[in-house]
Image (tube, helix red, strand yellow):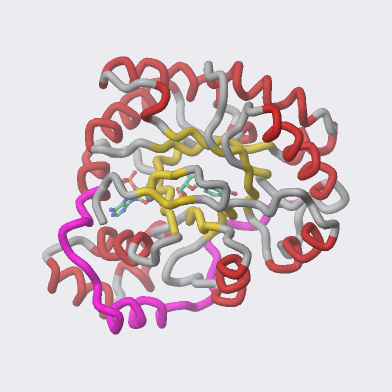
């Protein structure tokens, strides 16, 4: 396993094992962190229409790629379709808006941001149509729980979502959901992978002793726990360019099975991010 490791999705598309988050950032910040991230070795970014900055992400991406000398094929770009666009329903046009915003002619992964009740099954059918047009290399969902997958799959869609981007970290290991996803070849994209290092993680004796043992930070131990699972891809955010070197420097040590289990045991079924008002109890 190396910093160039990829996870193979169910359609064969290879996705980098870690990604850079971009939400709520302006151009100057994005330009700085994307260049720092690419220089450190990251090759994937995550954005969404509902972050309100897709056009700015597009400009910063274009500028950072040319600064570092990257081609389009070198970078894996994910964006998402939001609840507002699900409500209006013109999903086939929405992808063109995202492509225009991002200055791209395809995105690598297009996600449904929320299982918006009353809309998500129809949205998925249209996302399948967009996939068949070749404008997106893979399609998936975010914030789905088992009941949403069961409802979606009971309609026998042509494509099973390839990824679920979900809150996932040692305080929320969501075992039944993850087990369901593994049974259906749905990969985990882990958002809030560090759970903002809230005190139960920052002060954890288990994590601190692993950090000391391997001469790493607590953040690096958590990121290692993610990627060592083989199908969990953390997407983290940072305003600090130095973090990118730190967060990719996790390929020169390995946690033992017992250590992985000890990190798993920190689970408290805790979520940092509040749920969408449109998807109560997701
Ligand atoms: N699909 C969804 O509904 C959804 C929801 C939420 C988030 N997301 C995605 O997930 C991404 C990340 O989520 P997030 O921002 O909530 O969580 P996060 O990445 O777990 O936490 C971000 C915080 O962690 C700090 N950090 C990063 N690396 C660190 C390290 N090695 N040690 C200590 N602190 C570190 C950063 O601080 P510094 O700035 O000081 O480095 C930042 O304050 C977002 O950007 C977005 O792309 C998706």
Could you say where residue 185 lies in the image, as x and y percent from the top left?
58, 61
Vertical arrangement, residue 169 with respect to residue 258, above or below: above
For the residue pair 185 and 93, the one nearer the viewer reads as: 185
Could you say where residue 53 lies in the image, as x and y percent from the top left?
55, 26
Vertical arrangement, residue 214 with respect to residue 155, above or below: below
Q: Name the residue at 27% across, 18% down.
A: 69
> Secondary structure of the magenta portion, mostly?
loop
Labels in figure, total: 0
For the residue pair 81 and 257, the one nearer the viewer reads as: 257
Q: Residue furthest right?
A: 118
From the viewer's perspective, tell me whether residue 33 is left or right of residue 246: right
Q: Quadrant of the N terminus?
A: bottom left
Q: Name the residue at 21% across, 48% down.
A: 246
Q: Which residues are magenta?
A: 248-277
From the viewer's perspective, tell me whether residue 112 is left or right of residue 40: right
Residue 41, picture quadrant: top left
Could you say where residue 226 lies in the image, as x and y percent from the top left?
38, 62
Vertical arrangement, residue 21 with respect to residue 226, above or below: above
Could you say where residue 133 lies in the image, as x and y percent from the top left?
69, 27
Q: Name the residue at 83% across, 53% down.
A: 117
Residue 92, picture quadrant: top right
For the residue pair 282 and 72, the one nearer the viewer reads as: 72
From the viewer's perspective, tell me whether residue 205 is left or right of residue 230: left
- Residue 70: in magenta span: no
- Residue 276: in magenta span: yes
Q: Quadrant of the C terminus?
A: bottom right
Q: Name the residue at 84% across, 44% down.
A: 122
């Amino acid at each position: 396993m190396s910093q160039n490791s990829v996870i193979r999705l169910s359609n064969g598309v290879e996705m980098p094992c870690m990604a850079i988050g971009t939400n709520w950032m302006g151009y100057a910040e994005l330009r700085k962190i994307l260049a720092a991230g690419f220089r450190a070795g990251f090759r994937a970014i995550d954005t969404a229409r509902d972050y309100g900055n897709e056009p700015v992400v597009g400009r910063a991406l274009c500028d950072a790629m040319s600064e570092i000398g990257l081609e389009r094929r070198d970078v894996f770009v994910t964006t998402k379709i939001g609840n507002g666009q699900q409500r209006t329903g013109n999903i086939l046009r929405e992808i063109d808006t995202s492509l225009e915003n991002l200055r791209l002619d395809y995105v690598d992964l297009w996600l449904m941001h929320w299982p918006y009740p009353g809309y998500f099954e129809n949205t998925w059918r249209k996302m399948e149509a967009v996939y068949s047009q070749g404008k997106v290399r893979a399609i998936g969902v975010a914030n789905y729980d088992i009941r949403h997958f069961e409802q979606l799959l009971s309609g026998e869609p042509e494509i099973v979502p390839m990824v679920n981007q979900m809150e996932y970290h040692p305080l929320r290991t969501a075992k039944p959901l993850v087990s369901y996803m593994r049974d259906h070849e749905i990969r985990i994209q882990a958002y809030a992978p560090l759970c903002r290092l809230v005190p139960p993680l920052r002060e954890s004796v288990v994590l601190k002793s692993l950090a000391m043992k391997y001469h790493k930070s607590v953040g690096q131990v958590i990121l290692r726990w993610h990627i060592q699972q083989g199908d969990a891809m953390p997407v983290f955010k940072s305003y600090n360019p130095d973090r990118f070197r730190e967060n990719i420097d996790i390929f020169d040590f390995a946690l033992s099975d017992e250590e992985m289990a000890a990190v798993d045991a920190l689970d408290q079924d805790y979520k940092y991010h509040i749920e969408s008002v449109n998807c109560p109890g997701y």
